[in-house]
Amino acid sequence: PPRDSPRGLFWRSMGYVKVLKTSAYHKRYQVKYRRRREGKTDYQARKRLVVQDKNKFNTPKYRLVVRCTNKDIICQIVHSKITGDVCICAAYSHELPKYDVEVGLTNYAACYCTGLLVARRLLKKIGLDEDYAGQEEVDGEMFEVEEEGDKRPFTCVLDVGLTRTTTGAKVFGALKGAVDGGLLIPHSEKRFPGYDREAKEFDAETHKKYIFGGHVAEYMELLEEEDPDRYATQFAKYIEKEIEGDSLEEMYQNAHEKIRDDPEFEPTEKEEVYEGVNLQQKLTLAQRSAKVANKKAAMKAALLAAEDDDDDEDDDEEDEDEDE
């Protein structure tokens, strides 16, 4: 700006200001990928999960993608192409009511069931379900699928996205379910519930308790004794279905057996016509204008009525003062 202008005088009165973002910075600035800007994809991790060895040519590199939302657990078997990711099999925790698990669809036990479901469904799809049955007796111990016969096991790697991989995280419940279901996924026991980092020991009984919902049963009993009102609110669905903490282990045991017997996906029946979400009749411009005018008139009448009431109260107070 000119030296005599207000802006010029303002800048002259200031001290030395270092220009951090110069024109050279803006010229060289490169916009990040859209999903990085949205905070959805860690591309440093994705590169290591997706890139295949050159000597394997066009062999797909499969990933077990696990995502936990507020109301659902998503497990998918995915491989990437130039055009984008391709999902070859998927399972969701909202399918578990089919296997008599109607409550607690986002806890650790539900993650295990969903991982088991996607593993059995995939192996049945590609014809390996009889060759690789996995761990049929769930004990929480470390288990890895070993090659048997002419067919090699289906191998994939765990993709947790942006989830914090802390010890006992739910994504490792889905991993354990998929491994027990017959998939070969490189892993260790260090992130399962029951692993003591200081002693470097793994307690399989603790892990088994989580797989069968034992931690939920303990919390239900504790809350029912100490705060019945909160118990009635927090476990309303359990109470409605008449499910108690003692019956959770049996419920999940039966679910594991039913998943192994019938992992097939059953599409829901579609209706020809669905009712609209918003059933309000669409108004014309004249109707909308009249509606606004009526609201204004009603508000104005209410304000005038309130002012009249205030004036009447003031008059009454003045009359009382004169009488005294």
Image (tube, rainbow, N blue to C red):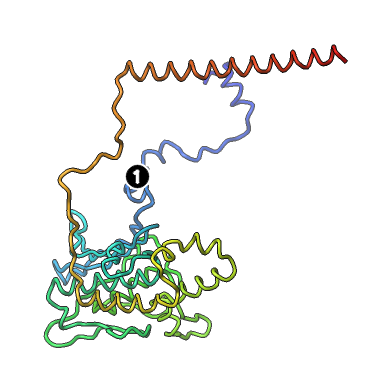
Q: Position of residue 320 (x, y in %)?
A: 81, 16
* Residue at the image point whose x is 36% and y is 58% from the top: 42
User: On screen, 121 above or below 292?
Assistant: below
User: On screen, 301 above or below 270?
Assistant: above
Question: Which secondary structure lies at badge 1?
Answer: loop
Q: Position of residue 268 (x, y in %)?
A: 19, 57
* Residue at the image point whose x is 16% and y is 83% from the top: 131
Q: Nearer the viewer, residue 201 or 247?
A: 247
* Residue at the image point whose x is 48% and y is 15% from the top: 297
Q: Which residue is mark 1?
A: 30
Q: Position of residue 210 (x, y in %)?
A: 42, 76
Specify the farthest residue to the right.
Answer: 324
Which image quadrant: the C terminus? top right
* Residue at the image point whose x is 54% and y is 61% from the top: 230
Numbered-mark total = 1
User: On screen, 3 above or below 170?
Assistant: above
Left or right of 20: which side holds 29? left
**Residue type, mark 1 in image:** Gln
Q: Position of residue 115 (x, y in %)?
A: 29, 71
Q: Determine the image quadrant of residue 80.
A: bottom left
